[in-house]
Image (tube, coloured by chain):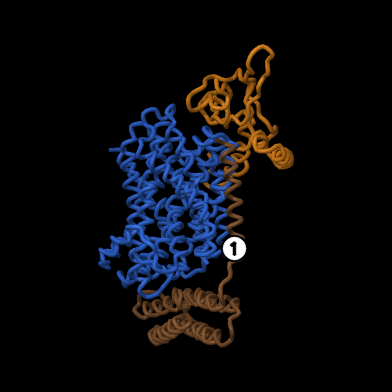
Chain colours: A blue, B orange, C brown
Amino acid sequence: MKKWMQLALGVLTGVGGFFDIGNLATSAQAGASFRFQLLWSLLLATVLVIFLVEMSGRYAAVSGKALPDAIRERFGFKFWAGPFLILSFIHVLVLGAEIGGICFALHLVTGLPVPLLAPVVGILVWLLLWRTTFSTLENSTSVLGFLTLAFVVAVVVHHPPLREVAAGMVPSLPHHHPAQYWYIAVSIVGAVLAPYLFYFYSSGAVEDRWDKGYVGVNRGISVIGMGFGSLIAVAAVIVAAVVLAPRGIRVDDYHQAALMLTDAFPFWGFVLFAVAMGVACLGAAVEVGLSMAYATAQTFGWTWGEDLEPREDARFCLVYTAAILISTLIILFGVDPFKLTLLTMVISAAALPFVAIPFLLLMNDRKTLREHTNGWISNTVTVLVVLLSVVLAAVSVPLTLIGGS
Amino acid sequence: MDLVRDVLDKQLVDREGEELGRVDGVILEIRPDGPPRVEAFELGFVVLARRIHPRVESWLERLRARWSVRKTARYRIPWATVQEIRESEIQVDVRAQETPAYDWEIWLRRNVIRHLPGGGE
Amino acid sequence: MRTVASRLGTGWWAAMALATVFLSCQTQSPEQVLLKSAEPVASWLATLRMTSEKWAANSAPSRFVRSTAQAADDSFEQAERDAEKGEASPAVREPFHRIFADSRSACDQLRRAAVADDRAAALPIARRLAALQAELAALRKANEEPTS
């Protein structure tokens, strides 16, 4: 029974890890500009992420090591140094985007300007990490995560044309603006396959002291957690397609997405959107901050753990503190949160090979995983992810220039 | 024993199981009569920097001399103190809190953490 | 394995740099630049219209309308600057400039109404925005190249 309580980790990772500001922004863009046509990229990303999250959890359960730990050990510092720095840079940008998202959600509710809210939000996120334990974070953010179901309810209210929705789940070529189409498709994959997700999930599994017995439950959690997150994202695409696209509204700014739920809920829609956005971004901010601290502490062999008191792992706490400080400053200095999000998603997509390639070797390490190494299905998916990541890395910069404007 | 695989970059823990750092470098003793022997482990950012490029190492050395809390750039752990080599970590017979590896950790505890709410006791 | 990876890495960055240079050198015709600058204007006109309608229906608060109008105005301003870049002939450029200016005017009207909490003004402004939308759509269609 306790193992299934671990579902909370899954849902937390699903809401914060899957449905975060990146997904909200890209889903709204996709629905507004291309209606249901880009649903296939979201579904593809979902399938891939389920496999990768399952692998992250399985590795942690069997070896007792989280991913960054294992990567430094197996690949050596010389190979890991470059990717580690790049991924740390991306972490800070993503954290900035998430904090920007929380700020905007608060701005919707209070009317206060986003840069002014940044220090408040930064302190809030920091306090959460400083004062709570991992299990408290898991349980509270996953309960709050259910508020994002507002998008799903809105879909039910809207009665979208099911045949068109289903057609969108099959890959198709765009009828207009092909560069923008593929740019959003790439951003969607970059938003879903975020590195912090895997580092957080595997480290969380170690924090929760998983052992080999959790391998089965891990599979369920991966599917349910990521499935839940995907459900919200798909709902967001559909709502944007039904509410924004017919009006000719393209999403280039959060203001254009904020009224998404007001057709379905004339009175509550505005607040629901703000709450859903705020909650998703808060969950994500916590995950990204922790992921950065996990990756850094494990890379250098420091004591780490959210369950520990700050004075027991001071350097670990210093990392997330510094990350939060820098990201807060980014928003405080007036960087546009929406543009930051889009930029980050593309850079994330470009850095995907650094995330994907280690999986290929780690998951086939018979010495560590014994009978739990990848089966042929998991390996095929992993190879596909690696190939896809190389393609994405190659096209993301050109696409940004022509499709992102 | 394969040095690179079994020792380098491995997690080190002290005699109580507390994390001590990672094996950033290995000091070898070249013997005329036989294969090289591990003399000691080396820990430190400077050691890591050397693996990237010697220039990075010297730059980091200068930074450390000016700004760091650490008393020594490189912390050496002699091979003789190794208690056990496990699959996932190497245990050495020291106490982490008393080693240079913990210089920053202890400095942060004393000068920063203590002054923040919830950091005391 | 490690040296192969680092060589691939350098090769990839070199390719990226080349692609970036190549794409930055791409030029568009003046008409294309104008049409491209009109896209966000159309989108923001639609946004402002929806915002006014929702405001009138009590689905959105006045402060949000003010904030959206501010964001829209920034975008209209940017569109005007982008339209200049193409250096199209004044005859072609003039109608676009007029609509962009009218859009900013309507946007400002909405902002002032929001500041004054004058919800009654919402629907007339929405109608004005709808008219501008239609005008812009017709203008874009008229300027579209036959091969697009």
Give the mark count. 1
The residue shown at (46%, 44%) is: A386
The residue shown at (59%, 59%) is: C20
Q: Is residue A1 above or below residue B35?
A: below
Toward the viewer: C45 or A280? C45
Please tell me how crowded label 1 is: few (under 14), some (14-19), or many (20+) other residues with Cα within 10 Å.
few
Toward the viewer: A35 or A150? A35
Toward the viewer: B30 or A326? B30
Q: Is residue A64 above or below residue A12?
A: above
Toward the viewer: A283 or C101? C101
Residue C144: x %, y % from top left:
47, 79
Q: Is residue A49 above or below residue A297?
A: below
Residue A315: x %, y % from top left:
57, 40
User: Can the viewer see residue C97 in this picture?
Assistant: yes
Q: Residue furthest front?
A: C147
User: Can the viewer see residue A144 in this picture?
Assistant: no
Instruction: Indicate left or right for C10 with C110 as reference.
Output: right
The answer for which chain carries disc 1 is: A
Residue A8: x %, y % from top left:
34, 46
- At mark 1, the secondary structure is loop
The N terminus of chain A, quarter of image = top left
- Amino acid type at image mark 1: Phe
Location of residue A239 (image quadrant): bottom left
Q: Residue furthest top?
A: B33
Residue A352: x %, y % from top left:
49, 48
Q: Is residue B25 above or below residue C121?
A: above
Instruction: Indicate left or right for A402 with A18 as reference.
Output: right
- The residue carrying mark 1 is A333
Location of residue B105 (image quadrant): top right
